[in-house]
Image (cartoon, grey):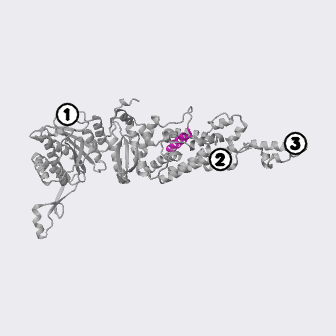
Amino acid sequence: MNIAATKASMRHLYLYTYLLLEEVKKKGRPIRLEWANIPTANIGPDPKDENGLLLQLSHMAATGSDEDATLLRALIAHEVLCHGNNTDFSVKPGAGLVGMISGRLEDPRGELLALQRFPGSKKVIREGIEILTKRGLYFGPDPQRQYHPAEILCGWLTTELRAELLDQTCLEQFGQDFRKLAIETFGTKLVNAIKTEALKGAHARNTQETVDTASRIVKLIEERKEEAEQETSEPETDQQGDQDGDVDNVEPPPAPAAEDSQTADSNTDKSDEQDDADGTGAGNSSTEGSDKGDDGELDSGGNDSGVGNNGADNSAGNEGGEDSQAHGSPGTDAGETGADASEPFEPSSDALQAALNDLLEAEQVDGGSYAKGLEDLLCEGNEAIALAKATGGSHTKEITEKPHNVTPSVQRRAALRSDSRALSASLALRMSDLLESIGQVRRRNSSDGRLRPSRIWKAAIGDLQICRTKTRQEEIDTCVYLLGDESGSMFEVFGEMKRYQAAGRVAMAAGDVLDEANIPFALATFDDKIRQWKGFDDDWSRSAACYTPTHQGNTNTDTAVVWSLKKFAGRTESRKILIVFLDGDPGDLDKLNAAIYEANHSFGVEVRFILIGTQHLNDFKNVTAPYGVATTPKELAEAVFGALEAAII
């Protein structure tokens, strides 16, 4: 696929991530997000917060396919909900086979636990798995290829557990094929025993139990290897010699009489007939081996008869049978000894010993792609990440937030408020009247609330009802974010004042109206960085006393809008409004329109722009959000209050 030709936006990037992190913070540990030049996602303890976690994600291109966006959602859901909520990062599984197996068990364990609080995560991750399968990162075994035993084990555990436990049916056939290959390589007895333990690990209560399960599986492999070594080293002596002792030191018995000889031959024939009727041979393994195989049986592909029935004993009677059984497949001609999942099968002792030796000595690289975590494959399969690496561009470089570090000044607030009233007093009054009529405000005297200077004297005579409070019979269920431009171009003349002066006065007037109406709002300004003057829960009186934009640098509209949108995460109001007033260009239109689309369609944030001047009017014709144009300070005030009125009323 030519990723350079892909133009669909990565609209899920910011808003889905931050909304999910906000939701997880309510139900679990806080998780901080960081974008970095790394090949894959990583989550672990946050060095800045001993009680929190740090999620690092790879930089991603501004555009990609819808499938890339789906992979990103699956990646975030897996990392945050599976590992962030359910993995104990203090437990270190170590390297080698134990680490590989524990990883194959920890992923489904965490996803199963995530379903209990976030049922939608199942669908999100399954859709990501389906795309990885489509792109060839999940696959079935190739009959023409020789696989390392570690890759066989990891491939089988990953596909079969995910298909069975998480309903990821796109992996079901892969799981069946890998199971057959695992039985051919390790035998039915060991495969069933491993599956029993693997299910325990996938349903473990914590990460430590999962690692302990992986250690038990490795122990099973070591024990089976020892059994294979014993089978290989057993002397092939005559059965009669075994019963009578050392044949070199015993006198040979006298030749039997003719009658005795005939009787012995007759007994031998009867014994052979009985063996044929039972379907067993002289070299069959004991029933003890059959019992051990049944202990590991977990599904319909269990071992119902003796493990050794199709094992090395048949090779004694068939020339070349050992090779046939070590690499058999269902329906082979060599005595029907293939590794069919419905038939018990054991490879030859030599072949099994060699496979288990390689397995126990395996390193991470020997496990192939199935030894990687799901997060690795979701990053590897995301072409938007590959594009970011190839071009050096990124959609995930966030605008830098800087503190304002301004000391509150009552005089500054009074001067700005006075100027704002001169510009927009009539508009603010009309807006207040409209809000009162909607909310049906009822004012009354009270001992708390807004102080009324005209009633202070009553305190001297014991009347403490010196404040004014108000209640609404119908609350306005809306929140507003005001985002203003403070770039260097805001120093240009705008009617009888500068652009920044007009913007500051309008922002102050709008803030007063929203505060008076008890509508939650926030205020920030931006250039190539962003400064938040008031958060949704901050006090407006103190914030207004600090408001002093510096007006320098360039206008990074796209990243500022995306930054502001994530501030709506966790807001419960039915309507959420973002009003942006600026004189600069819209920046990266793909990124800006992507954020606007996702804001409107998924998270209920309405974005509205007020353009100061007409210099960039043509650029905004391609922005997919309502916008207005102001050429004078009065028009700016009318546009901002008009946007508020249209959004709230």
Between disc 1 and disc 3, whose residue precedes?
A: 3
| Image x and y of residue 56, in percent | 37, 44
> Could you classify mark 3 by the number of other residues whose Cα lies within 10 Å: few (under 14), some (14-19), or many (20 or more)?
few
Magenta stretch holds residue 87 = no
Kind of residue at badge 1: His
Element carrying mark 1? loop
Magenta-tinted stretch: 148-163
Disc ID at residue 262? 3
> Could you classify mark 2 by the number of other residues whose Cα lies within 10 Å: few (under 14), some (14-19), or many (20 or more)?
some
385 above or below 110? above
Per the image, the residue denoted by label 2 is: 227
Looking at the image, is mark 2 or mark 3 nearer the viewer? 2
Magenta stretch holds residue 150 = yes
Kind of residue at badge 3: Gln
Per the image, the residue denoted by label 1 is: 616
- Judge left or right: residue 413 versus residue 211: left
In this view, the residue in front, 72 or 399, is: 399
Picture quadrant where residue 391 is located: top left
